[in-house]
Amino acid sequence: MKDISVRVFRYNPETDEQPHYQHYQVKIREGARVLHVLHAIHDEHDPTLSYRYCCGSGQCGSCAVRANGEPVLACTKEAQDGMTIDPLDLPVQKDLMVDMEPYLAEIPSLEPGSEILVPTQDEVDAIKPLRSCIECLACVSACPALKVIDFAGPTAMRENMRLALDPRDIPDRVTEAVCQGLFTCTSCQACWKVCPKDIQIPGKAIEKLRALANRKGLTLPRHQSVEKLVRETGRSVDRIGTSFLEQVPEVLEPYGEVKGTVGFFVGCMYNMRLPQTALDAMEVLRRNGIRVIIPKEQVCCGSPLIRTGQIGYLETLQRRNIEAFVSRGIDVVLTMCAGCGSTLKNDYECPFRVMDINELLLKFEIEPPARLPVKATYHDPCHLMRGQGIRAEPRELISRVVDLVEMPSVCCGSGGGVRSGVPEEAAALAENRRKEIEKTGADIVISSCPFCEYHIMEHTDRPVKNIATVLLEGYREKDKKKVREDWS
Ligand code: SF4
Ligand code: SF4
Ligand code: FES
């Protein structure tokens, strides 16, 4: 047995003006779960503590709470000393109990016709990844979209897709999903990452429903324009000046000894909208002994098409990109756009290794930059943190140059075609980011994705910089100091 202390959210709307936290010291067994802690509090400290549970074994979905901010099942999450236990981020009824009814009501049910049909094995196999939901609503609690716009939520979308695959179900689930906000999902993947049953809602339900909507002609007109642009130009954004690819030679040699060679996949945004950021990254790589090969015939990775369900031209893009790197014998392809990196890693079958720039720079043990007298906060790009599992590396690099102050990791609203398709939602999510940035008191915002950088830039008065730019500023400061020392 051991003693742990926990902080628990308490709120009784009948007696409390405001919610508050209560600290408890409880004795639990090694390996005890959050639910055991709640039982101990209830039995030994306060029988009025309200929380839900039933099966105690991860099957019923009734016990979901947030542990240190993360939606979890209380009966499967191991309790830790110092833990904070909150209700799901849904309307609170009392203490840890939330009002699940309105969200459960959005989940559709199978409506069979008069004909008796049995799904084929292929249909059963297609449905399988979507059917293990226990309706815990962890995904709903984590979804940023439904907090700012009318959206039935991730598990309702999951069930729509499941029913769309089921031959026994009669209604038009695709059109229903569109009406329930299918195009408001930002592809942030928060729902998948918190799902106790590991249901890949964005990829297996939302993108699939969007592809079915595309076949029905229900794709948003703004998304159709992006697809047309990709077919016509190979790029998903318009030119606003000289592109990155037009400014660099095919091979950039490092300044000193060659420590490694990579191919560089620039992506549409850094190529067309933020070329200086990509040029900054090239300087950082050259300074650290990395030779960069930049095939000029590379095109859009296809992410804007996959996320919006317009996959007709995808194979052509994939073939052109793979060929561009394979024909040069490149075995490591570097990305600095979180969306491109995630797409190349997860939606391509690449015959080469794909590395994000944060991974690569840490692998090569880069030259230390000078420290800058700057307080910065970092915005986690969804497609870097969740799409590629890269969270620690950017923080490690940033901390070498500036002081880092954290803010919660939440989607900025620029992904999943939402910035172009549902701009009012994208703006509302960015406004939430602005408030969080403000709270940190940071001088600058750092990120590692052109979509996030571009979008956040429009919604904050602080400078928004890429990690590579900040590292380069650290190197320039180091060079200046050296010159000053040499002259003194
Ligand atoms: S991917 Fe993000 S926005 Fe889309 S349903 Fe999941 S949590 Fe919501
Ligand atoms: S999809 Fe996963 S997280 Fe969402 S309600 Fe179902 S089991 Fe819970
Ligand atoms: S009590 Fe049933 S899932 Fe936790």
Image (tube, helix red, strand yellow):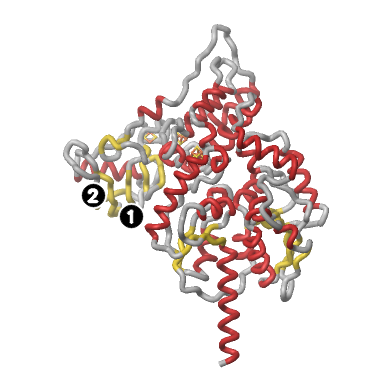
Asked if disc 1 and disc 2 are in contact, CB closer than 8 Å, the reply is no
Q: Amino acid at mark 2?
A: Gln
Between tags 1 and 2, which lies in front? 2
Q: Against 376, is 131 above or below? A: above
Percent position (x, y) of residue 128? 57, 28
Q: Is residue 21 left or right of residue 157?
A: left
Disc 1 is placed on an element classified as: loop
Q: Nearer the viewer, residue 200 or 376?
A: 376
- Numbered label attached to residue 81: 1
Name the residue tied to disc 2.
22
Looking at the image, which residue is at 75% across and 41% down? 232
Percent position (x, y) of residue 168? 56, 15
Q: Nearer the viewer, residue 352 or 128?
A: 352
Percent position (x, y) of residue 341? 64, 51
Looking at the image, which residue is at 40% across and 53% down? 435
Query: Which residue lies most toward the top here?
Result: 114
Classify 10 Å Cα crowding around label 1: few (below 14), some (14-19), many (20 and above): few
Q: Is residue 7 left or right of residue 406?
A: left
Looking at the image, which residue is at 69% across and 44% down? 348
Percent position (x, y) of residue 231? 74, 39
Q: Against 373, is 292 above or below? A: above
Is residue 31 in view? no
Q: Earlier in the sequence, mark 1 or mark 2?
A: 2
Q: Nearer the viewer, residue 284 or 82?
A: 284
Disc 2 is placed on an element classified as: strand
Looking at the image, which residue is at 57% across and 23% down? 164
Q: Quadrant of the C terminus?
A: bottom right
Q: Amino acid at mark 1?
A: Asp
